[in-house]
Amino acid sequence: MAADVIDGKAFAAGMRASIASEVAALKAAGIVPGLAVILVGEDPASEVYVAHKHKATVEVGMTSFEHRLQAETSEADLFALIDSLNADPAVHGILCQFPVPGHLDERRTVARIDPAKDVDGLSVTNAGLLATGGDALVSCTPLGCLMLLRDRLGDLTGKEAVVIGRSNLFGKPMAQLLLRENCTVTIAHSRTRDLPGVCRRADILVAAVGRAEMVKGDWVKPGATVIDVGITRVPHPEKPGKTRLLGDVDFAEAAEVASAITPVPGGVGPMTIACLLANTLTACCRAEGRPVPEGMTV
């Protein structure tokens, strides 16, 4: 029996509609959430991501502040901009689009952003708050995955979860979120022994390693829920000169075993920007001393 396909695109659209409604209510009270995005250099992929973020921000009624800097911008000048945004009450969320040019340090850049405005959830402060059960701003992609899992499964208590990947950006915060949901969590990685056997234990299997179709159908426990975070562009087998996107999971094989699975594209991807907007709304509400709307954070 084929798995149900988890429609992240539709879920994200519903989230954006809810966020737009909350933003309209804030505007009626004289409060306008603002998101500042910094782009250093002219990386083509980053240009596309920033354009998508700007469009989504404006569509839900927030103010979008774009700051485009030359590739040779010094750390001092970048930090001066971040300091000014930290001090600006009209800016509730700040993110610097990565990667940055090689002379700039990503960790130092993240550390310069006020944790209360760190809507990417990458700061040591927010990572620590997440790990200790505090009111963190959570990294957007793992937050989106958790929302999809809650919507699909309801209470996650007692479920065995396996996260393949241990990055600071995704794997570690995803594991922390699942722990907060009372799952039993295993983080697997490149040095895990018998990785297929570990995966077969999982009621919830989350793959985030960036290797196309690495996870095969016989790695999946019958009835498991599979969240595919990977995205790799490969040559199209039937269209010379064209490419297609593949996830970390062999979708056709896994869909014959799992009860539910996210597709690539259209699964996790749309949730990332939706959760960026949710984090900006959360940061705004906290800054203004207002309650965070239900369903926007953990």
Image: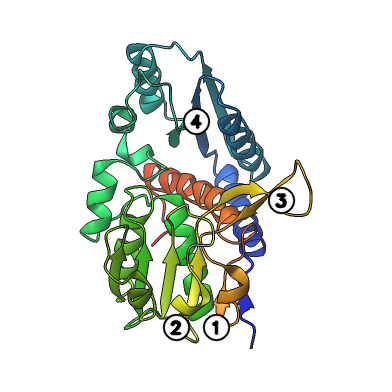
Mark 4 vs 3, N-terminal side: 4
| Percent coordinates x, y for residue 119 in the rendering | 42, 42
Residue at label 2? 221
Q: Decide: marks 1, 2 in contact (CB < 8 A)?
A: yes
Q: Which mark is residue 36?
A: 4
Q: CA distance from mark 4 to mark 2?
A: 42 Å
Q: CA distance from mark 1 to mark 2?
A: 7 Å
Q: CA distance from mark 4 to mark 3?
A: 37 Å
Q: Is residue 137 visible?
A: yes
User: Which label sits in the foreground, 4 or 2?
Assistant: 2
Mark 1 vs 2, N-terminal side: 2
Going by the numbered disc 4, the residue's amino acid type is Ala
Query: Which residue in the rendered view is the most extreme toward the right?
Result: 239
Residue depicted at 29% across the width and 76% down the height: 182
Q: Is residue 291 above or below residue 146?
A: above
Mark 4 vs 2, N-terminal side: 4
Going by the numbered disc 2, the residue's amino acid type is Lys
Q: Is residue 129 left or right of residue 287?
A: left
Residue at label 3? 236
